[in-house]
Image (spheres, rainbow, N blue to C red):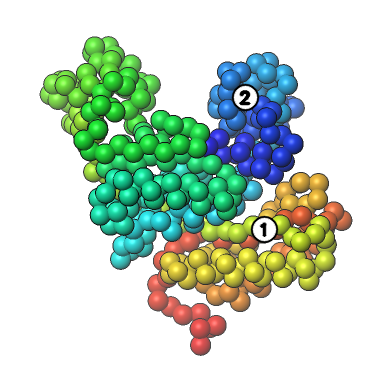
């Protein structure tokens, strides 16, 4: 995703478009005590970067809009984006060939769908971009390659809102002119050691004696460096067990505290979540309800169940309990509501009472 957190804030508050937006992870010790989580491209023109102290970012651009990170809200958007992307992946016996590696980034394999045709892969990548833009009003950048290493590196070539395809015959032309620090998986320490060895570009690394690399970095790391510099990567896609979440969030027809109107929307969202779980034969153990009120303040409440379940009735029961708690505490009308389930795992065959 392109400048994901800041892009979501732009989407939610259209009056921010065109301004420098900085999303901060605040420590709570002062107005801008914390670090920059992400910023849009307008802010980057001022030299603002992720990880920078927010106070320093303020000095670089006093006119920028500084916003606190809303991690739960961003996660709910991420859940929907990931479901869009997942739907394009090849299907294996164990599930889709899909691996989410962060809140805004994922790998998927489309070898079977394309038959190895990189032109068709370009078309699928374009479809994914259009689908995400149509449904979520957000842009993403896509990299297509013969493996995870190349796909990851090519995804950064045409940001924002770009797509780059690197077929096997273009590997050397793509990789070798780059500085060795640009090779995905190489940190500052490794890059420094390589430069001390006279290895400046990825081509230098590809042509370097592997025995020398092994003696410096150890067998496993040395061999990996040699292979990666030639675009070789056989690491598989791995679904993350237990850490993934599935959620849906939507805007109410009008700002309201009417329990019936809110319940109707929550029931529909819960049904969508259960459909996603059923399609992948997953159960859940945590339920989170998100509420965004008419003042754009977000609140969340969660429940952890005693054991994994997958019945819609259980999900509806828990969502209604949490909703009643929200309504008893709030005097400000709700604008958006969402349902999210977590601690997902494959169903083990045991039925719930509702299946009988």
Out of 201 and 36, give the one closest to the viewer: 201
Q: In this image, 253 relative to 54: left or right?
A: right
Out of 87 and 244, give the one closest to the viewer: 87
Q: CA distance from mark 1 to mark 2?
A: 29 Å
Residue 151 percent location from the top left of the image: 34, 39
- Image point (50%, 41%), residue name: 140
Q: Which mark is residue 43?
A: 2
Residue 231 lies, with reference to residue 58, above or below; the image says below
Residue 350 percent location from the top left of the image: 43, 78
Q: Quadrant of residue 251?
A: bottom right
User: How dense is the environment of label 1, judged by Cα within 10 Å: few (below 14), some, or many (20 and up)?
Assistant: some
- Image point (31%, 57%), residue name: 113
Residue 159 lies, with reference to residue 337, above or below; the image says above
Q: In this image, 136 relative to 61: left or right?
A: left
- Image point (25%, 23%), residue name: 176
Q: Label 1, on which residue?
A: 250
Of callouts 1 and 2, the N-terminal one? 2
Contact, CB < 8 Å: mark 1 with mark 2? Answer: no
Is disc 1 placed on a helix, strand or loop? strand
């Amino acid at each position: 995703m392109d400048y994901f957190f800041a892009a979501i804030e732009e989407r939610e508050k259209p009056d921010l478009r065109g301004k420098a937006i900085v999303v901060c992870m605040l420590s709570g010790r002062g107005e801008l005590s914390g670090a920059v989580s992400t910023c849009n491209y307008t802010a980057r023109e001022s030299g603002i970067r992720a990880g920078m102290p927010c106070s320093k970012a303020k000095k670089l651009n006093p006119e920028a809009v500084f916003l606190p990170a809303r991690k739960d809200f961003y996660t709910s958007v991420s859940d929907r984006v990931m479901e869009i992307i997942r739907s394009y992946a090849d299907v294996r016996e164990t599930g889709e060939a899909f691996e989410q590696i962060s809140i805004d980034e994922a790998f998927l394999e489309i070898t079977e769908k394309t038959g190895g045709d990189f032109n068709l892969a370009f078309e699928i990548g374009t479809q994914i971009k259009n689908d995400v833009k149509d449904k979520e009003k957000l842009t993403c950048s896509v990299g297509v390659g013969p493996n995870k290493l190349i796909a990851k590196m090519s995804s950064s070539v045409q940001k924002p809102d770009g797509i780059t395809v690197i077929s096997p015959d273009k590997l050397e032309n793509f990789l070798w002119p780059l500085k060795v620090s640009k090779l995905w998986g190489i940190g500052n320490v490794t890059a420094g050691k390589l430069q001390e060895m006279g290895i400046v570009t990825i081509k230098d690394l590809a042509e370097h004696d592997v025995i020398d690399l092994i003696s410096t970095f150890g067998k496993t790391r040395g061999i990996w460096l040699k292979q990666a510099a030639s675009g070789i990567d056989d690491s598989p896609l791995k679904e993350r067990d237990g850490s993934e979440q599935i959620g849906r969030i939507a805007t109410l027809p009008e700002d309201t505290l009417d329990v019936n109107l809110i319940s109707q929307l929550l029931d529909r969202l819960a049904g969508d979540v259960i459909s996603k779980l059923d399609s992948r034969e997953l159960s859940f153990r945590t339920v989170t309800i998100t509420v965004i009120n008419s003042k754009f303040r977000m609140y969340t409440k969660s429940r952890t169940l005693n054991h994994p379940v997958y019945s819609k009735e259980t999900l509806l029961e828990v969502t209604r309990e949490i909703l009643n708690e929200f309504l008893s505490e709030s005097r400000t009308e709700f604008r958006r509501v969402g349902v999210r389930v977590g601690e997902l795992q494959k169903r083990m065959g045991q039925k719930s009472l509702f299946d009988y």
